[in-house]
Image (cartoon, helix red, strand yellow):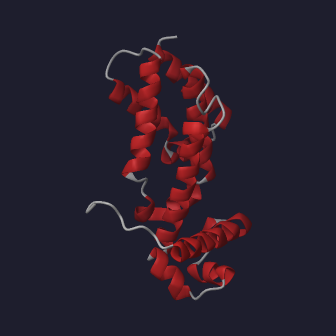
Amino acid sequence: MADQRPRERSDAARNREVLLAAADHLIGRRGVRAVTMEDVAAQAGVGKGTVFRRFDSREGLMAALLDRSETAWQAEVLSGPPPLGPGAPPLERLLAFGHSRMAVNLLHAELIEASGRAGTRSYAAVSFTAMHVRYLLGELGVRGDIAILATALLAPLEVVILLQQTGTEQIPLDRIQIGWDDLVRRVVGC
């Protein structure tokens, strides 16, 4: 089909994973800000040009790491253990979803920043979170403009807001989670 992306060759996929693993390893040791394309190339045992050809830029590399993290997180939401995954009542799932999203966004805050424009959350990632929250609100029997209510619940989970609250305002994460749970319960009506 014309609109499908060409399938990645198996050797290209392996090389991509080697480069992402190298970047992941270095970030784990040094932090996002200290990792360069040269470092990743050296860790992976390839030339710097290989990293640039594969990811175009440092932002592109960071965006690929962010995308990989996002894909893993979405798999946990769709098929992981309850309460984040299926099997828990919808309110428990929604609360777990919010707490998990906060944790993931704070964990990857520097990666999100380093991804820059290339790492702007993809439409698919934003669509997934909105669709999942809408689904859970529907399961809970919430009435009203579900799309707007879902957006209102998702906004406090965004990294820029979380960093402002946890950094500038020095609000502890548990207090933010309690506040978000209160917001959810008000929207849900319980």
Query: x%, y% of residue 33?
Result: 61, 68
Viewer-proximal residue, 78 or 38? 78
Q: Is residue 166 above or below residue 181?
A: below
What residue lies at 63% left-to-right and 41% top-to-bottom?
170
What residue lies at 45% left-to-right and 31% top-to-bottom?
133
Query: x%, y% of residue 58?
Result: 50, 74
Q: Residue furthest left?
A: 2
What residue lies at 68% left-to-right and 80% top-to-bottom?
43
Q: Residue furthest front?
A: 1
Q: In which quarter of the image is the N terminus?
A: bottom left
Residue 179 makes an appearance in the image: no
Q: Is residue 173 above or below residue 70?
A: above
What residue lies at 32% left-to-right and 61% top-to-bottom?
4
Q: Which residue lies furthest to the right in this view?
A: 29
Residue 98 makes an appearance in the image: yes
Viewer-proximal residue, 78 or 170? 78
Viewer-proximal residue, 66 or 85? 85
Which image quadrant is residue 155 in?
top left
Q: In this view, does 68 lie above or below 9?
A: above
Query: x%, y% of residue 119?
Result: 45, 60
Counting the numbered discs, the total is 0
Query: x%, y% of residue 153?
Result: 45, 30
Viewer-proximal residue, 12 or 174? 12
- Left-right relation of 38 to 129: right
